[in-house]
Image (cartoon, coloured by chain):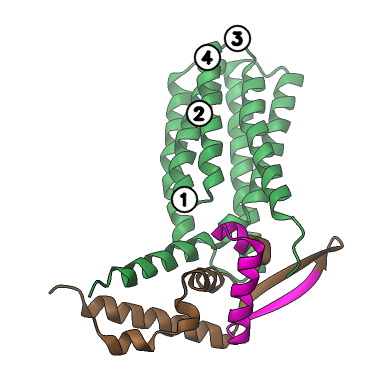
Amino acid sequence: MNTNWAEDNLSLIRTLMERASIYRRALAPIMIAAGVIGTTAAVAGLSLRLDAPSQFLACWIGAAVVALLSAFALARREAIRLREAFWSPPARRVGLALLPVAVAGVIAAFVESDPARLAGWWLLIYGVGLHGAGFFMPGGVRRLSWFFVAAGGVALGWGACSPHVIMGLGFGGLHLAYGIYLYTTRSRPISL
Amino acid sequence: MNLDAFQQLDKVIHEKTRLAIASLLAASPELSFTEIRDNLNLTDGNLCIQLRTLQQAGYIAITKTFENRRPRSTCALTAKGRRAFSDYIGILEQIVRQNRPN
């Protein structure tokens, strides 16, 4: 008798248990935080006229570090609240999937001297990495990643815009929009 | 296939939707109705029926609260449910092991 169903059931159990793990539920506040940090960095960059390549780099690498630390803090807070493991196998996979993105972003910063083009490359690279990591996260993350890829492509093709505007709309705006979407869709009233 | 092992499978958990619900709850202290429904792409009615079956078997506990004046139902596996889920996985693994070619 065929026993594939047993393996299928075990596979389903594994997938669903990963899906319910902690980092998914912390995703909405993480996205909102990244969006707010991105938007704030863009406003600061524009208002303080941080247009020189070194100033642009300092502004956005600083924003990336703050966003990363905020994401860790939010996920950690949620893990403590629910008494769950923070560095779970799925969280590890997401981290490993995003690691090449960070490396590629640093390499791009070294080889691309034009801030507007660098902003485009960053969005493109981030979108590609997010798509890979999205296989361990809700399906919406993969759809979001295509917006980053598209924004990066437009920025590279167009290039006639302030790099802070590109990053503000891309890194800030897209994260913020997805975070708001997650918040609004998960708070629908339900009665059993 | 070992029919004895198959017959030992808990029929409450073995149903695909209930198995999916139990799997989600096994990985989390509690989940809201909405989270389960959205994760499994179920209708409200179907989820209610499956939750009621699990609740009647004593496998889950449902807590109703209000959040911002909106009703919020959260579900959690009970100790009995966790044990039944763990036993179910054990039997599945046994079936897979027994039928794996040497």
Within the magenta stretch, is there residue A86? no
Question: Mark 3 or mark 4, which is nearer the start of the sequence?
Answer: 4
**Label 4 sits on residue:** A114
Q: Position of residue A177 (x, y in %)?
A: 68, 37
Query: Which circle, 4 or 2, is nearer the viewer?
Result: 2
Q: Position of residue A133 (x, y in %)?
A: 46, 46
Asked if the residue under mark 2 is in contact with the one under mark 4, i.e. CB atoms within 8 Å, the reply is: no
**Label 3 sits on residue:** A160
Which chain is drawn using green?
A
Q: CA distance from mark 4 to mark 2?
A: 19 Å
Query: Residue at the location (29% across, 81% down)?
Result: B94
Check disc 1 and report its element: helix, strand or loop: helix
Instruction: Point out the residue furthest to the right here.
Output: B69
Q: Which chain does the numbered disc 4 sit on?
A: A
Bin the neighbour count of mark 2 within 10 Å (Cα to Cα): few under 14, some 14-19, many 20 and up: many
Q: Amino acid at mark 4?
A: Asp
**Label 1 sits on residue:** A94
Dots 2 and 3 on the same chain: yes
Q: Colour of chain B?
A: brown
Q: Amino acid at mark 2?
A: Val
Asked if the residue under mark 1 is in contact with the one under mark 4, i.e. CB atoms within 8 Å, the reply is: no
Check disc 4 and report its element: helix, strand or loop: loop
Check disc 3 and report its element: helix, strand or loop: loop
Q: Amino acid at mark 1?
A: Val
Dots 4 and 2 on the same chain: yes
User: Main structural element of the magenta stretch: helix, strand or loop?
Assistant: helix
Residue A149 is marked as 2
